[in-house]
Amino acid sequence: MAAIVPVLFFVLLAFGAPIFVVLGLTASLGFSLNGLSLVPFAQKVIDQLNSPMLLSIPFFVMAATYMEKGGIAHALVEMAGAWLGWLRGSLGIVAIVACVIFAAICGSSVATCIAMGTILIPAMTARGYDRPFALGLIGASGTLGILIPPSLPLILYAVIADESVPRLFLAGVVPGLLVALVFAGWVVFRAHRRGLPKGDPLTIDNVVGKTVHALPALSIPLIIAVGIYGGYVTVSEAAAMSAGVALLVSLGYYRTIAMRDVIPVTAQAVGSAAVITIIVAVALAFGHWITESGVPAAMVRVIGDAGLQSWQFLLLINLVMFIMGMFLEVASILLITLPILLPVLPALGIDPIHFAIILTINMEIAMITPPVGLNLFVLTGISGAQISETIRGVSPFVVLLIIMLLLITFVPQLSLWLPTTVYG
Amino acid sequence: MIRILDLLENWVVGILGLFMLVFALAQVAARYLLPELVAGGGEELIVYIFVWAAMIACAGQVTRQGHVRANLVLRLLPIGVVRFLEAINALAALTVCAIFIWFGSDVVNIAILIDEHSQTGVSFPMWIYYLALPVGAALMAIRYVLLLVRIISEKGSVTKEGLMREASV
Amino acid sequence: QDDVYELRVSVDTNLQTSRTAHLAEYLNEIEKRSDGRLKPTLYHSAQLYADRDVGKALLQGAVEMAMPGSWTLSGIVSDLDFPGLPSFFGVSAEEAREIVDGEVGEIINAELDAKLNSHVIGRWHELEPLHTYSVDKPIESFEDMKGMRIRHPGSAMQSLQISQKGATPVVVPWPDVALALNQGQVDGLVSTHNTVISGKLWDTGVKYTFEDANSRMYQMMLIANPAWEKLPDDLKAIMEDTWEEMLPTFLERVRNSDDRDREVLVENGFTVYQPTPEQLEALHEALAPTEEDAVKELKINPAISEAIIKARGGM
Ligand code: NA
Ligand code: NA
C-alpha cells in the first residue's frame, strides 16, 4: 500500500507539478496511510515556518535582488574583470571569485546562484562561453554559499548536534577555498583547450576606475564581515543589513533602482523567497512522514549491525547522502538523518565537526543533482535554458565535487585545522 | 476581482516586505541606541509578517509560473498532451490548496480553542499567525482555478515557448 | 488478552541529556514489564516534534506520548510560568519538589488534561537548575548583575527573572548564542551546566558561572487521553508504578550529574560563584512586593501563587 507514495512522487515530479505540490500531496497521502488526520500535517507545515532562522532566507534573497537590480553585483563583477581580464577564461575565474565573495556574505546557495547567475550567465554566453558550461560553473560555484560561512545548513547542524556555531563556520573555510581553487583549475584547463577569450587587458586606469566604482558595493561584504565576525549582529540581522545597504546604495549611488520601483522589486524578492519557503515547509513535513515510516532507522541499524570501520562507514554515508540528495531538500535530509547518525559517531571515532563538513559538501552536490536540485531549477529559471542543458553543464562539476568530497572525507585535518588552531 | 488580487499580490506583499526590512534594521539600531527599550520579541513579529507576506506572494507566483518545478518531460511531449498534463497539475495543486484551507482552518480553530499564545513577552495570539496558511492557500486556489479555466477554454493557453521561458525563482 | 499498544513518544533533546536518557530507560522497562504489550517507539532530538509544538501534536493525535519541558508549554498553559514568580525565587531543590508534587502540580496537571486532552503520568521529572553565566565580568553577587545584558531563549518568565535582578534580558535564539557571546552582543546567559558543556561555550569566552539557581524547571510525561483510556488497567498501573519506582533514582542522578558537570566546567577554566543564603533571602524579600504584578504579567492563576507562599511559610 505504502508503495503508492513513491510512485505518486515520481509521476507528479516528472509531469511538471510544482515541487511543493509534489511533496505536499505525497506527504498528505503518507500521513493518511499512517492513519493520521491531516490536521497535524497542516500544523506541521505552518509550525515549520515559525523559526527566526528562516528569516535569513528572505533577507538574503532581498539583498540578492537589490544587488542584481541595483547594479551592485554588476559593479563587483566588473571590478573582478578589470583585475583578472588578462587571464584566458577570465570571466570564468571572475565568476568563481565573485561567488566566493558573495558566499562570504550569504548563507544560502540558492541566493548565491540567483545573484551571480543573473549577471554572469548572460555575460559569459555573450563572450562565447557555451551556455551549459556557464550554467554548470555558476550552479556549482553557487553551492559554495553553504560551505563558506555563514551557512544555513551548518546552523541547522549546530542546532541538531549541539555543536558550537563558530567552530562549524571556521571548519568550512579551508574546504570552501579548496573547492573554489579546484573549480578555477578546471576553468583554466577548459579555457586553454577551448580557446576561451581573455577579457580587457590589465590597465591602471581600468583597474582604478572599476574598483572605485565598486567601492560602495564592496562596503556590503565589509559591513557584513564586521557585523558578523568582529561584530555585533546575528546572522539574520546581518542579512537584513546587507539588504538595507544594498537598497540604499542602489537608490543613492548606482541609481539603477528608482523610488517607485522599491515596492515592486521588494514584492518580487518576497515572491522568490516565498516559493523557496513553501517548499522548505512542505519538505520538512514530508521528512516527518519519512522519519515516522521507520525506513531511515532501519537503514542505520543495518549499517550498525554490519560492524563497519569508520572509513567504510563514511564512504557508505557519502553514497547514501548522494542518493538522498538526488531527491530531497537539504533541511529535510539533515532533519531525517542527523538524529540517527550522530549517536553512531563517537563509537567510530568520527569528529562531529568534520562530519558536518562532509555532510555540507554532500548537500552542495544535492543542490545540483537531478531530479530535485534547487540550484538546477533556479538556473533554469533565470537563464531560460532547458533543464537538460543545466544538468549537462553541472555534471563535470559534480565529478569535481565528488573528488573533493573524498579528499575532505579522508583528510579530516582540512576541516579541523582552522577551528582547532583558533579554539584549541 | 482580479485587479484586487493583483493589487494584493504586488503592493501588499511589497509593503509587508519593506516593513519587515525596516523593522529588522530598526531593531538592530535600537539595541545599540536604546538598549533598555529592546526586550526582544521583535524577531518573532518579523517571522509572522514574513510568513503572511510569503503565503500571499505564493498566489502571485501561480500567475507568473514562478513555482519551482521540473518541466523537462513536458518540453519533450506533444503540446496536446502537455495541455492535458497542465490541467492535471492545476488540479493537483488545487488539492493541496484544499488540504491547506480545510485542515489549516482546523489548526486556526484549535489555537483559538486552547487560547494558544507565543511564550514570549509578546504573547502573540497564534491563531492570527496560523491563519496565513488557509488564507494564502485560498488566494492560491483562486489563481489555480483561473489557470485551470484558461487551460481548458483557450486552446493557445499552453505553448512550448511558455514552457521555455518559464520564469522560476 | 494480548493486544499490543503502540506508543509514539516524542522528546526534543538528544540521548545525552538526562531527560531523554531517563525516558528511554523508562520506556524499555515498561515494554519489558508488560511483556511487549506496551510497544513504545522513542523519537528523540525533535525528530518528530520540537517541544514547542508537541502539545498540539498530542491534542491532534499525531503522537501518543511526549515529555516536554514545562517552559515550552506556557504558551498554552500560562500557569507553567510559575517559576518566574518572586515567591518561587531562591527555593531549594527539596522545597521546590514539595511544591510541584503538591497543590501546584495538581492544578497544572488538571489544566494540561483540559487543554491538551492529555494525562500526566506520575510526578514531574526535573531539569538541572538554571544558572547565570558570564563572559568578561565575573558575577559574584546579585549586585554585579545590574546593567548586564543577559541572553535567554525568549520566554516571558525568564525575561522577568532577569529583569528582577536589574539586568537587561536579550532574546537570542540558541543557534546564534555562540556568535552573540563572541561578539559581545550579550554579556552572559541563563542556562544549565549541562547545556553550557554540550555547547562548549568556553570556546566563545564564557568563563564565569553564578549558581543563583535562578530557575527550577520541570518536564512532564504526557500521554494523550484517547491512548490512555484505551489501555487496560494493568497496563496503566505498570506505566504509573514503574515511573514512581524509577523517578527517585532519576532525580538523584540529575543532581549528581550537576555536580560532575560543575567539575567539567572548572576543568575548562570556569570560576564558580554562589550566592550566600543571606543574599538569596534578601533578594527574595526585596522582590516580594512585586508578586502581584508578576502574577498579572505572566497570567498566572493566583491560587498557584498562594499555594507557593503557603508551602514556603509566607513570603
Ligand atoms: Na556562505
Ligand atoms: Na539533488
Image (cartoon, grey):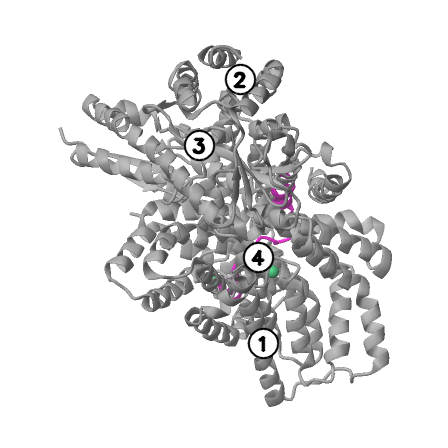
Q: Disc 3 marks which residue?
A: C69
- Indicate the position of residue C48 as horizontal and vertical percent values: 40, 42
Give me the C-alpha separation between circle 1 and circle 4.
Answer: 19 Å
Please indicate, yes or no, whether residue A260 appears anywhere in the rendered image.
Answer: yes
For label 4, the SS is loop
Q: Quadrant of residue C44?
A: top left
Circle 2 — which element? helix
Q: Amino acid at mark 3?
A: Gly
Q: Indicate if the residue with disc 2 has its beta carbon within 8 Å of ligand 1.
A: no
Q: Chain of mark 3?
A: C
Whether residue B9 is situated above or below residue C94 in the rendered picture? below
Q: Which residues are drawn in magenta?
A: B52-75
Question: Tag 2: residue type?
Answer: Ser
Residue at image position (30%, 66%) is A309
Judged by depth in the image, the label closer to the viewer, 3 or 2, is 2
| Residue hosting label 1 | A181
Q: Residues within 10 Å of mark 4 (few under 14, many from 20)?
A: many
Q: Nearer the viewer, residue C126 or C137?
A: C137
Q: Which residue is mark 2?
A: C87
Circle 4 residue: A151
Q: Residues within 10 Å of mark 3 (few under 14, many from 20)?
A: many
Q: Residue A142 magenta-drawn?
A: no
